[in-house]
Amino acid sequence: MLARTARLLAGSADELAAQVTRETGKTLAAARAEVRSAVRILETTARAVPTTAGSVVTEHSRQVWGFELTEPAGVAAVIGTWNMPVQIAVLKISAALAAGCAVVYKPSPLAAATAGVLVDAFARAGLPAGTCVLLHGGAETARLLAAHGGVAVLSATGSELTGQELMRSASVGVKRCVLELGGKSANIVFADADLDRAIEGVVAGFVRNQGAVCTAGSRVLIQHAVYQRFLERLTAAVAAVRVGDPFTAVDVGAIRSQEHCDRITESVEKAVATGATVRTGGGRVPVPGRSGAYFQPALVTEVDQSDALWRDELFGPVAVCAPFRDEQEAISLANDSRFGLAAGIWARDLTRLERVWRELDVGTVYVNSYHRTDSIPLAAGGRKMSGHGVEHGAAGIREFLASKSVHIYR
């Protein structure tokens, strides 16, 4: 059924991508990439199902046998988000279904139409009626769903505040929570890195999806020996990012709302008021014939490390830059965050890379790339305020399974 759903989404990819662009403002190219990613997730989840099925049998003696069974945990409540309404929903729903759980899916009200298309695709692929149902609503609906006695597992993506509220609601039933929350990820550039590749990866790390990505590499740490040279090149690359109508050949489309664009702009302005410097971008961009909210990606330096722009998730295309002298300072700066979702490292020295990735207190590390996984279904999850539990592959399916031990005396 998951494989059939993948084929259905692939067959209607253009129409679905256009719907995503209309609802989120992301570029059509980014929406198409998101649909392709969702198709791959369905395919890899389908292949991972056999690795979570069945039981382990152990013989303690001639008279005693023991079985360890895995069973569906029960009904799964899935809380979606607007920034990646196809990929995130498919990731969570497919894992729950693969475990044998029925799903109640509450999408973001900002991506309600896309959610309807997805649930319909599962139904057309053969999922029995009532196994994946759509529940529309806002924050109060999410809290009620999390607290509901019929829900066994809650899987949600959102801000740290959203995660805290949902956990409080879920605590009524002491139910399992799989939460992927905020991030303020560091992207670390060492002097021996391939600087051409690093420039491209750093820009993509915070500009992709208008910066509305939990794992966005929005804190750029650059080794002192190449700081000025790299910063000059990075500034030019960010200034060249094309902003405009998301249905045209641009790099960045529209911010999801005027209010969200205002918050991004105000955050940059507040940092400047306390001494920060905007190297490029940072303001609204007029787009002829379009009334949406368009923002030129910004690169900001001299940001105080106690400032909100350095410490808080902005969910917009803004990066802060700072120099470091050695590995330990880079690790210290990267880990000095209440979040622990992801990080990037750019270097040629393999021993250095290993030393650094082992010390980073995050759930995912990108090495000489950013946001690239190439469909490898490795488990991914957050640390600290970035949530808990994992997603992707067999490990993600196991989050929706319950264990049972059976002891037999003959």
Image: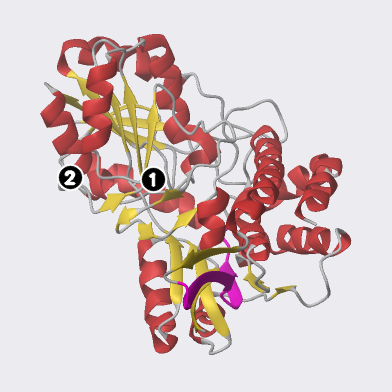
Say if 26 sits above or below 167 in the image: above
The residue depicted at 56 percent of the width and 46 percent of the height is: 293
Q: Label 2 sits on what residue type?
A: Asp
Task: Report the side of 381 relative to 154 (left or right).
Answer: left
User: Which mark is on residue 139?
Assistant: none
Where residue 404 appears, x then y in whole percent? 50, 76
How are the residues colored? secondary structure
Say if 361 sits above or below 149 in the image: above
Q: Is residue 290 visible?
A: no
Where residue 53 appears, x then y in whole percent? 62, 60
- For the image shown, how many numbered marks are present on the structure? 2
Q: Badge 1: how crowded within 10 Å, few (<14), some, or many (20+)?
A: some
Q: Badge 2: how crowded within 10 Å, few (<14), some, or many (20+)?
A: some
Q: Earlier in the sequence, mark 1 or mark 2?
A: 1
The residue depicted at 53 percent of the width and 90 percent of the height is: 149
Q: Is residue 222 visible?
A: yes
SS state under label 1: helix
Task: Report the side of 408 relative to 11 (left or right).
Answer: left
Span of residues in magenta: 62-81
Q: Main secondary structure of the magenta part?
A: strand
User: Which mark is on residue 336?
Assistant: 2
Q: Which residue is mark 1?
A: 265
Q: Quadrant of residue 105?
A: bottom right
The mark lying in front, picked from 1 and 2, is 2
Specify the quadrant that holds the N terminus: bottom right
Examine the structure image and report whether residue 204 is included in the region drawn in magenta: no
Examine the structure image and report whether residue 70 is included in the region drawn in magenta: yes
Say if 192 sits above or below 55 in the image: above
The residue depicted at 23 percent of the width and 54 percent of the height is: 338
> Which residue is farthest front?
62
Of 317 and 345, nearer the camera is: 345
Of 264 and 142, nearer the camera is: 142
